[in-house]
Amino acid sequence: MSKLKKADFGGVVFTKHALERLVERHKVYVGTDLKDPLATAQKIFAKAVPEKSGALVRRLIRYRFQPTLYFVEAGWRFVCQEDKGRLKVLTIERSKD
């Protein structure tokens, strides 16, 4: 994973951790390796829509009571927080959308 770094995508920052989780989970759930994790994350995120937060309130504790935004697309959930006026993707996980 050493090639993965924090990446900026038009006001959205993908952390190294988020890209590593995408690579890991893509292998498990889709069964293939990603050639370009950043491009894949950008492509999916570009189509993502906000997830209804009611069921995710309990997760607020996990993110240190910071306002956390969730976006979903094609079975993927992007866990984000605002940071200095930009959206930072903290992790990418599987969703049930």
Image (tube, rainbow, N blue to C red):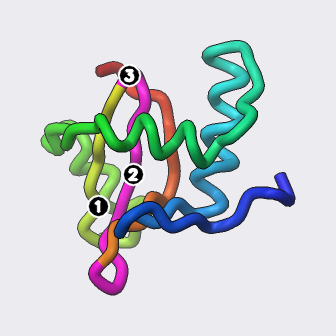
Residue at 29% across, 37% down: 48
Q: Give the mark nearer the N terminus: 2 vs 3.
A: 3
Tag shown at residue 79: 2
Question: Which amino acid, by three-letter code, is at mark 1?
Answer: Thr
Circle 3 SS class: loop
Inspect the magenta stretch and tell me whether residue 83 lies in it.
yes
Q: Quadrant of the C terminus?
A: top left
For label 1, the residue is 68
Give the class, few, some or many, for how many residues have Cα within 10 Å of label 1's Cα (few <14, many ≥20).
many
Q: Nearer the viewer, mark 2 or mark 3?
A: 3
Q: Residue at x 76, y 26 (%)?
A: 33
67 lies above or below 18: below
Which is in the foreground here, disc 3 or disc 1? 3
- Spot occupied by residue 57 in the image (x, y as percentages of width and height): 22, 50
Main SS of residues in magenta: strand
Proximity of marks 3 and 1: CB atoms separated by less than 8 Å? no
Amino acid type at circle 2 is: Val
Residue 74's disc is 3
Q: Is residue 70 magenta?
A: no
Of residues 26 and 42, the one nearer the viewer is: 42
Most foreground residue, 42 or 53: 42
